[in-house]
Amino acid sequence: MSFPWLLRFGAVCGVLVGLSIGVPGVIESFTGETAATSFVIALGAAFGAPALIAFQLHQGNAAGRFGDFAFAVNLVGFGLFTGVAFALNAVIFFLDAAVAAELLRGPARLAILGATVVFVAGTVLFTVSMARARVYPRLPVYGYGVFLVALALAAPLPDSLLTSGLHVAVCASLIWLSLSVWSAAARRGDLGARSGRTADAALSGRGTHSGRVV
């Protein structure tokens, strides 16, 4: 498995998770939350971790040790929040309102709050690491930090134009970062291909030269 392939895979996952947040957000601004949009958000969250790994691989050593720590916290937070998103959108959404309210008054509420705290902390730390590394454009970096945190904190609120707008802003930030990763993967792939052709040509030349000597 090549490094450029990992970057491309992560970039595709970043686009998918962005679309799984943004498209339902646009639809819900007209229809409100539906079973279909909730299901898309629930499944789309699974693509967040591979995208985050690609984001970190792209900035690499430029992020330093702080970047490694921030990535680790954000990755754990993403995993926890993926579970929260799946539970809220693919399970609790389909429960009777009274049952859902009773469920969220119990230990599940503490679990959701804890996961949200870790996710928010990791997102803020990773945003700082990207800003310090200066590998990505600044606008999507700050969009990643501001809008993802705002979206997580707004999760308990009823659907509105504000929450739909946050969905779209998060989508745009994730896709922008993912396109930066994709471009970097393409450059690495081209460089690797040129290096391979140069090495083949050098070996071929040596073989020809050896034949003439003999």
Image (cartoon, helix red, strand yellow):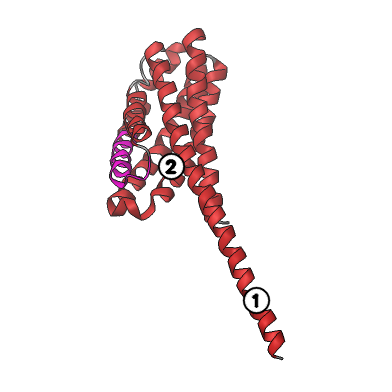
Spatial CA distance of label 1 from label 2 is 43 Å
Q: Is residue 194 magenta?
A: no
Q: Earlier in the sequence, mark 1 or mark 2?
A: 2
The amino acid type, in three-letter code, at marker 1 is Gly
Residue placed under numbered mark 2 in the picture: 52
Q: Quadrant of the N terminus?
A: bottom right
Which residue is most to the top? 30
Residue placed under numbered mark 1 in the picture: 205
- Residue drawn at the location 59% of the way across and 66% of the way down: 198
Name the secondary structure under disc 1.
Answer: helix
Which residue is most to the bottom? 214
Q: Is residue 146 visible to the viewer in this orientation of the structure?
A: yes
- Packing grade of label 2 (10 A; few <14, some 14-19, many >=20) is many
- Residue drawn at the location 54% of the way across and 45% of the way down: 8
Residue 33 % position (x, y): 49, 13
Judge by depth and name the residue closer to the eye, 175 or 116: 175
Judge by depth and name the residue closer to the eye, 9 or 197: 197
